[in-house]
Amino acid sequence: MTVLKIGIVGCGEVVQIMHLPALRQLADKFSVSALCDVSPTVVEGVGEEFGISARYADYRELVADGDVDAVLIANPNAYHAPVTLAAIAAGKHVLVEKPMCMTLAEADAIIAAEAAARGIVVQVGYMRRYAQAFLKACEVLPTLGPVRLARVHDVIGLNSLVVAATSRVVRGRDVPAEAVEEGKRLASEAMNAALGDASRELRMAYNILLGLSSHDLSAMRELIGVPKRVLHAAQRVGGFYMTAAFDYGDFVCQFETGVDAIPRFDAHIEVYGAERSLRVDYDTPYVRNMPVRLEVTEANGAGGVLTRTEHPAWGDSFTAEWLAFHDNVVSGKKPKTSPSDFRKDLEIFAEMVELMR
């Protein structure tokens, strides 16, 4: 079995808590050969902790490293597109954390580069879609018959409320001032390109769509398909809370999300048929191996109700997506969470933003 050498750009909390332990667990398929972070404290601290000697401050140097087969991109959102394009140009496979990019133009550039590169795998880090319970839900869905209603719900506490209590994370206050300013400039330019003239509240809503909500709507698309149009979308409380309704023709999918100060993770997808419903429940992604569960409810045939809860297998969704990435690279398969697949989420976001205006 081919062992892929991984270079990591951006060594923050999701890399330290989830990705590096997953890659260490899968040592028969991956080795981490290089790290990059603009904080010397972070790149040195993580390098020491995980025994990785090649350490860079500039992503261009990492993607040019001959000892790197594939690049995990987990730095701030505004850098995802340029680093992805640089990695493809260097002949490296890519697993890029969501969002793959911030604008449709960036998505089109990545799709074109991927097509021109031939044989390069670019996979977007939608780990929820690789969870065993979600895959089982996709199998069960046809047994519901015609769908009558669907609901996507994601109201969570700040990630820091969980991370601070469960993990040790190396953090650095030594990011060079010029890097901080460049990051702000790139983020502002991308936001302007995506939204044009927009209020602070709409920009915050778009940031949440790119982050938390991209998981929800991506999973929605795989489970029940792409909606015909967005019927309603609104943001409130400075953009931190959103609702939407998606038109599927014969039924409507309701969407709701928000971020509060309660340390819990309340995320699920429900689909209702006439005589059977299913629900996928997710827990925080910042604690490894938390179960993702599938619940199926139906009439029991004797005047009552039968509810079956299934946890198909132990294992983490991040580990599952890395296994899929390895298989895609070794077998030359196109990931289901591909750049062109991600673009569909940006299209939905654009419709939602216009209604929010």
Image (cartoon, helix red, strand yellow):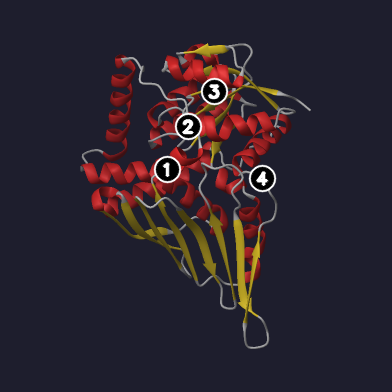
Residue at the disc numbered 4:
315
Which one is earlier in the sequence, the residue at label 3 or at label 1?
3
- Seen as rendered, the residue at the extreme bottom is 303
Q: Residue at x 36, y 44 (%)?
A: 208
Q: Nearer the viewer, mark 4 or mark 3?
A: 4
- Seen as rendered, the residue at the extreme front is 165
Residue at the disc numbered 2:
13
Amino acid on which the number 1 mark rests in the picture: Asn
Tell me: residue 84, above or below residue 229.
above
Q: CA distance from mark 4 to mark 3?
A: 22 Å
Amino acid on which the number 4 mark rests in the picture: Gly
Residue 229 locus on image (x, y percent): 40, 58
Residue 234 locus on image (x, y percent): 29, 56
Tag on residue 159?
1
Which one is earlier in the sequence, the residue at label 1 or at label 2?
2
Tag on residue 8?
3
Amino acid on which the number 3 mark rests in the picture: Ile
Residue 255 locus on image (x, y percent): 41, 59
Amino acid on which the number 2 mark rests in the picture: Glu
Q: CA distance from mark 4 to mark 2?
A: 20 Å
Q: Secondary structure at mark 4?
A: loop
Q: Secondary structure at mark 3?
A: strand
Q: Marks 3 and 2: CB-CB under 8 Å?
A: no
